Image: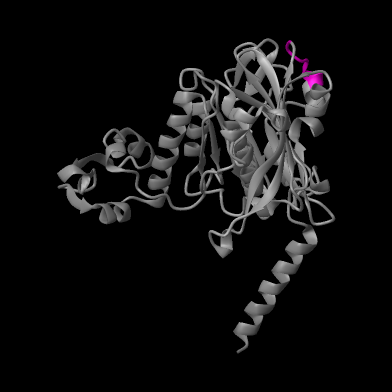
Amino acid sequence: MKLLSLSFDHVNLFEDGAFGIDFFAGDKVPAGDESVTLLEKPLYINNVVALAGINASGKTTALRLITLALAIIQGGIAVLPPFAAGVEDLFAAPPCMKAVLWEGGEILVLECTLAYQNTTITASLNRSFSFVEEVLYRFRGVPTKSLLIQGADSLIARSEEVMRRSTLDETSRQFLADNVSIMTSRKDSLCYGCHVAGDAPLPPSDSLFDAVDILRAFDPEIEYLNTLEDGNLFELKFSRDKTPSTLSRVELERALSSGTLRGLSIVQSAVFALAFGGYFLLDEIENHLNKQLVNVIIDLFVHEDTNPHGAVLVFTTHYPEILDSVHRKDCVYFLTHEADGRTGIVKYSDRIKRIENKKSEVFLSNYIKGTAPRFTDVVALKAFAKSVIEGARHE
């Protein structure tokens, strides 16, 4: 099963309360383009989706919404960490989600309405979601790109109803909890994983056994890493040292750089998604990593030899130069600050038609308004810094 598009309404942060994103390739797919996966001609999905924006523009919120959608499609509402906390608080009212899916040659549309359900587990977790209504539709044939671009409602108008939660027979309802989706009845499912910015813990010892090649990519000084005493101790040898060091897990985490630890964690999670054709959501891809290593991670998803099953990487970034490594235009989204304080989501290919435009220059130039800090805010920040520095100098 593959996700083609999704949308939510009643989202607090986004303009008009609406969040929507496409995963299918809307632009022309040239021969030999390995950054897309063919589902059924002329339908392709993008193997990489990039969300770019300045600080506090809603990038992590976007990942939370995508994670919630993937959880629902997978059959429930339990969102995986690190994006689980506070998902219910993203909405001004109980939301409706619409997801367009491809499964075994069929186009499906899932429309579900959620409601808040109180729970008394803890005061901090006093709200959770339950399903009010779900409807699954089937579209006959393969839709055109123009119809897909029009969105889920256009597809629903041309589809037949397959299943409706409220009309299920009594026996089926007995085995369907309020927080379990009707999608559990589907033979196919999605798998996904998430990774947030910041320091990454050392993975379990059994995962480290074959990790030396990954570690060397992020720290070429590492000669070898062996596990001792059933994983309670480690033998680490750097090329700059004459002899190896025997370290505990805590000492090993201190010996490895934060970039090496995060790189190891990211690659291992990415390989899992690549092996099963899943979805890998990565917040702040550039955190602790240099640009070349970021490109290495992206490249895993854009070449058929490492991505034979059409796995999808969805990442956020502050740094527009990373976008220049993503050669397609229809898989890049800019999250913009709007005048009313909300966030807009702009598909790059909807605004920029010329292929030769560098995405980083479009981002930094503020050509799409709201992608760069306002000039007046930058001037005010500099003035504040200057006043503090001058005051300190005269004390």
Quadrant of the rendered structure where residue 142 is? Answer: top right
Above or below residue 148? Residue 217 is below
Residue 137 in percent (x, y) is at: 73, 22
- The answer to whether 277 appears left or right of 11 in the picture is left
Question: Does residue 336 belong to the magenta stretch?
Answer: no
Q: Residue at (29%, 53%) from the top-left corner? A: 255
Q: Residue at (60%, 89%) from the top-left corner? A: 395
Quadrant of the rendered structure where residue 144 is? Answer: top right
Q: Pick the residue in front: 272 or 1.
A: 1
Residue range highlighted in magenta: 141-147
Question: Does residue 146 belong to the magenta stretch?
Answer: yes
Can residue 244 be seen here? The reply is yes
- The answer to whether 250 appears left or right of 194 in the picture is left
Residue 67 in percent (x, y) is at: 60, 40
Q: Residue furthest front?
A: 170
Residue 229 in percent (x, y) is at: 15, 45
Residue 370 in percent (x, y) is at: 78, 49
- The answer to whether 33 appears left or right of 378 in the picture is left
